[in-house]
Amino acid sequence: MKRLHPAWLVAAVAFVALVGAAGFRATPGVLIHPLHDEFGWSLGTISLAVSINLLLFGLTAPFAAALMERFGIRRVVAYALLLVSAGSGLTVFMKHSWELIALWGVLVGLGTGSMALAFVATVTGRWFVKRRGLITGVLTAGGAAGQLVFLPLLALLTDAHGWRTAALTVAGAALAVVPLVLWRLRDHPYDLGVTAYGSDGDVTPPPPATTGAARRALGALRTAARVPAFWLLAGGFAICGATTNGLIGTHFIPAAHDHGMAEPTAASLLALIGLFDIAGTIASGWLTDRMDSRALLGWYYALRGLSLLVLPVLFAATVRPSMLVFILFYGLDWVATVPPTVALCREYFGASGPVVFGWVFASHQFGAAIAATATGLLRDRLGNYDLAWYIAGGLSITAAALSLLLFRTRRSAPAPTPQVVTAAA
């Protein structure tokens, strides 16, 4: 019987770690109204904490990718999970809005940012040559799986036992994954005496990192900034973040509540997005291995924009079939953009692809942070979310146009760097 390649076990542990860290990603939408009711904080103030989290979530990613090159995947991921656990658990003691910002925004933002999609790019770049797009899709779906697991649970716990129980549940879930990461996650294939899956190269250790993580991350940014494709990818991904984490992920439940829908019901709908997202992202990874990623991004963004333009008329006190159609459609598209974006970063930037993708992902979270706060302020001023949905729909169509402009830069892009087992791959 042929032995299972250890890359698959590493991918499985990475998936579980991403699920464990995803607990907090499900938390803000569930806890916005309970925090508002208990402390009297405005939705804009609470959204500011979410925005800082989203911003740090993105800005940490490229430095985390460089830290993984310097200190190893296992060590960085373990510390990241501990930060998520501490940040979520300590919220039960807070009394002031600045504490929410420090815990939700800073601690959890740094922790989740260290396990962002740059982590996915690093794992797939080191451990896989074949099936790379597919594994990128599967690992990206780990966040959606975490949302699927945690959202209904957190909503029920909040409804029955209060928001503190939900926060402690997230803290415990992140903490529980740490022993598994320390036990089974490995930094490089050479640690186990093998090559990356699908590689015919020799089992040779990677050269040691000779530059600091900050210098490596900033150097990759300076190089990428001179390539027009970087700005097209970053611009599209900023809009991607604004229309997913920043808008739907943060404000869908409060928006549904405004129309009379119970929060556990709205949370279940958001969890369904996570369910369909798993299928959509894995399918996107499969397509990325077979189609031009530029065309895929164009389709994904355009279809998302059209769906957001019709969303305002779908909200009601009960779940209607039309809303279920939106949930299915939007779920399939939620983070389907990730596998083709990772692939394009590798195509344009070779061995620096994972770190450059960290910067592209930072733009994703920058867009998410702006959208989370701006949408909360719009809701405070206008009394509804309708304008936010229309703006998001128009922005998504703009992102489709940016993606199609990448075809103009295709010929000038360098050929992908041959994949060998190195610290940067």
Image: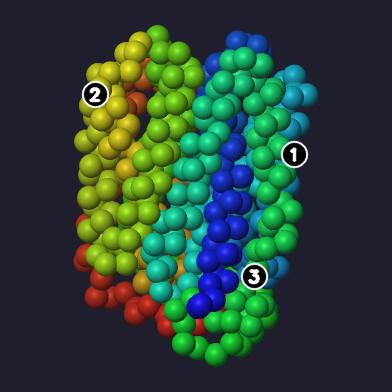
Of labels 1 and 3, earlier in sequence is: 1
Residue at mark 2 to residue at mark 1: CA–CA distance: 40 Å
Residue at mark 2 to residue at mark 3: CA–CA distance: 46 Å
* Location of residue 18 in the rendering, given as x and y in whole percent from the top left corner: 57, 50
Left or right of residue 88, residue 412 in this image: left
Task: Say which amino acid is labelled 3.
Answer: Asp
* Front of the two marks 1 and 3: 3
Residue at mark 1 to residue at mark 3: CA–CA distance: 25 Å
* Location of residue 70 in the rendering, given as x and y in whole percent from the top left corner: 68, 70
- At 55% from the left and 16% from the top, the residue drawn is 33
- At 66% from the left and 17% from the top, the residue drawn is 162
Above or below, comparing residue 251 to residue 293 in the picture: above
Applied colour scheme: rainbow
Residue under numbered circle 3: 187
Crowd around label 1: few <14 · some 14–19 · many ≥20 (10 Å): many
Give me the disc on residue 288: none
- At 47% from the left and 25% from the top, the residue drawn is 267
Left or right of residue 131, residue 301 in this image: left
Residue under numbered circle 1: 86
Above or below, comparing residue 278 to residue 313 in the picture: below
The answer to whether residue 228 is seen in the rendering is no
Which structural element holds mark 3? loop
Task: Say which amino acid is labelled 2.
Answer: Ser
Instruction: Tell which of 348 and 186 is nearer to you.
Output: 186
Residues at badges 2 and 3 in contact (C-beta under 8 Å)? no
Give me the disc on residue 322: 2
Of labels 2 and 3, earlier in sequence is: 3
* Front of the two marks 2 and 1: 2
Crowd around label 3: few <14 · some 14–19 · many ≥20 (10 Å): many
